Image: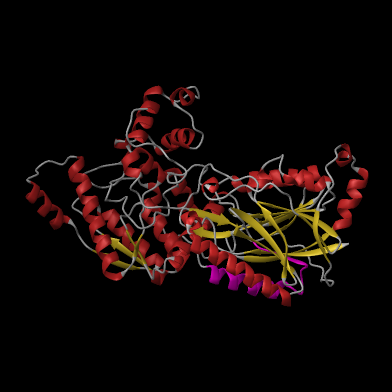
């Protein structure tokens, strides 16, 4: 017995129910002759996360009307549709709806509502308490949503004990580095433990601070990935499941006989015409630098496109951060939509000038030059300042930010900030200066990873001048300045920051690992003091397990 599925890995436009319905209809029509079931991600109808749109009754009414429209649409299809949506029934639920032949076959309401990291689902939804099982073409399917399958005591075991051969889970699972490998490993365990196919359909796209990587997949009862969709792009993945494989394996593996469940409740049973068999397609899953780079491209592209910006503008200093952001912008939206601005001061070296012009030429982007020496001198005269303290240094960064935002205001361009996570963590960035921007692509990228990604990009096309990769990092706000005048070496700093931010370690925990106590105390003190700055920084994509933004909710005032 064979059941053919279409995994519709889409990039919804959040809040635009009409746009998303059109996409669902189009893909459903394309897939109906080839699949018994066409499956869309979690909250595909409205996009994820809708945040406080879910507190607007008119928005929920719009979603419920869209459901009626899709139910009517299903009359002309020869497939079952599965999609996620906010569903109102006395209260609001994060729901999965199954429709076919002009009627709703069943509604599953998400049981485990995540309320950690970037998630706030308990703010919006009531938790569901009932399973949903439907027999499609003689195959028993059990349904769940995202977080539900992360719990070993979720519905999957109940479904398996009730005879379901396919465990279907729809998702809007955000990306961070290292998450996919962990996710695939526990999904394999779910398939093996329950002797069933696991069908995992994930969203793709950039949504403000989040990136969804796609990589929908199907795992067989032996824990083998038999199908995987593309990473960081939309995809329509077809797969045929040999259900007899589950039944044969269960016949010899007696684990599921050891437990009983209450009489299973099969909501519906539907028979459909035969569908074609599909060859297995297992797309490669990128790792490390390539994966991070593609995540950043998607984040930039979607932020620019979904907010209707025609161009982006960024300051180019001849340093590694701005060089990488320029490459990312060009690769994401094209060279004709990227404008670089060089704003040399009296402390800018001739080497930095050469590197900026070489980079711009290599990338083929427009370059504007606005020297700031005279403007800076005018400020110093106005302020009656004759010294060069940190205030005078930061004044240069703020003058540059003013120029960038003038161009943004004049032409409607999006300013890309070039500040990285290492700088933001310890406050080594100027508020209303280099921190300023409309979007911060490398906000969650440590300095050591900035270098890794720059080298990765140059391995594809060597656009970044080699000198930029080799010279000591410097803000060039005073003569002969380097970052290491103020900070520990980035290789050391980033290790301490990673342990403190991502792993939640305090002073004693980090020192116990062999780090110098005074160095760690200094770094943690700088992290605490910079909190008020970070709260005013532009948003940027989450790339690590814990990013500054929704992921990091520390008080500004106080003493810890």
Residue placed furthest toward the front: 90
Residue 331 in sight here: yes
- Return the x and y of residue 351 as percentages of the image width and height: 29, 54
Q: Which stretch appears magenta?
A: 17-40
| Front position in the image: 329 or 532 | 532
Q: Give the main secondary structure, helix, strand or loop, of the magenta stretch.
A: helix
Q: Which residue is rendered at x = 38% and y = 31% of the image?
A: 524
Q: Which residue is rendered at x = 50% and y = 48% of the image?
A: 543
| Front position in the image: 558 or 396 | 558
- Return the x and y of residue 522 as percentages of the image width and height: 35, 29
How many circles with numbers are drawn on the protein? 0
Q: How is the image coloured?
A: secondary structure
- Return the x and y of residue 170 as percentages of the image width and height: 66, 56
| Front position in the image: 97 or 399 | 97
Q: Is residue 423 magenta?
A: no
* Quadrant location of the N terminus in the rendered image: bottom right
Left or right, residue 533 beside residue 180 = left
Q: Which residue is rendered at x = 10% and y = 54% of the image?
A: 378
């Amino acid at each position: 017995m064979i059941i053919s599925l279409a995994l519709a890995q889409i990039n919804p436009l959040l809040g635009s129910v009409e746009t998303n319905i059109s996409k669902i209809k189009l893909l459903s029509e394309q897939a109906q002759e080839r699949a018994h079931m066409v499956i869309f991600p979690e909250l595909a109808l409205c996009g994820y996360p809708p945040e406080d749109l879910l507190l607007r009754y008119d928005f929920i009414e719009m979603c419920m009307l869209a459901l009626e429209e899709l139910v009517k649409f299903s009359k002309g299809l020869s497939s079952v549709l599965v999609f996620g949506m906010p569903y109102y029934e006395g209260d609001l639920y994060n729901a999965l709806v199954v429709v076919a032949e002009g009627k709703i076959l069943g509604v599953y309401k998400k049981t485990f509502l995540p309320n950690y990291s970037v998630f706030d689902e308990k703010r919006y939804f009531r938790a569901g308490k009932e399973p949903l099982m439907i027999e499609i073409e003689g195959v028993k399917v059990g349904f769940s949503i995202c977080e539900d399958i992360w719990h070993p005591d979720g519905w999957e075991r109940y479904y398996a004990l009730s005879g379901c051969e396919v465990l279907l889970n729809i998702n809007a699972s955000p990306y961070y580095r290292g998450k996919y490998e962990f996710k695939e490993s526990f999904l394999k365990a779910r398939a093996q433990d329950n002797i069933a196919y696991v069908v995992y359909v994930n969203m793709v796209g950039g949504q403000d601070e989040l990136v969804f990587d796609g990589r929908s997949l199907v795992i067989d009862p032996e824990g083998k990935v038999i199908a995987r969709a593309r990473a960081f792009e939309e995809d329509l993945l077809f797969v045929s499941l040999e259900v007899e494989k589950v039944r044969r394996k269960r016949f010899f593996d007696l684990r599921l006989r050891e437990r009983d469940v209450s009489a299973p409740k099969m909501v519906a049973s539907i028979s459909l015409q035969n569908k074609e068999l599909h060859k297995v397609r297992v797309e490669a899953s990128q790792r490390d630098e390539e994966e991070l780079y593609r995540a950043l491209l998607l984040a930039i592209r979607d932020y620019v496109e979904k907010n209707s910006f025609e161009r982006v503008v960024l300051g180019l200093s001849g340093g590694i951060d701005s060089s990488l952001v320029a490459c990312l912008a060009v690769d994401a939206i094209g060279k004709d939509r990227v404008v670089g601005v060089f704003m040399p001061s009296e402390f800018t070296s001739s080497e930095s000038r050469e590197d900026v012009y070489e980079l711009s030429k290599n990338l083929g982007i427009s370059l504007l030059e606005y020297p700031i020496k005279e403007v800076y001198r005018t400020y110093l005269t106005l302020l009656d300042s004759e010294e060069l303290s940190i205030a005078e240094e930061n004044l240069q960064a703020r003058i540059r930010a003013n120029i960038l935002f003038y161009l943004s205001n004049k032409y409607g361009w999006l300013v890309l900030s070039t500040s990285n996570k290492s700088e933001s963590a310890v406050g080594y960035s100027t508020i209303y200066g280099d921190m300023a921007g409309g979007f911060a692509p490398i906000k969650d990228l440590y300095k050591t990873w900035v270098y890794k990604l720059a080298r990765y990009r140059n391995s594809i096309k060597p656009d970044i001048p080699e000198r930029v990769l080799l010279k000591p990092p410097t803000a060039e706000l005073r003569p002969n300045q380097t970052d290491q005048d103020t900070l520990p070496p980035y290789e050391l700093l980033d290790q301490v920051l990673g342990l403190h931010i991502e792993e939640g370690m305090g002073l004693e925990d980090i020192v116990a690992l062999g780090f110098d106590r005074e160095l760690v105390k200094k770094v943690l003190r700088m992290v605490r003091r910079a909190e008020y700055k970070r709260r005013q920084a532009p948003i940027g994509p989450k790339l690590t397990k814990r990013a500054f933004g929704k992921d990091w909710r520390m008080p500004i005032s106080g003493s810890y």
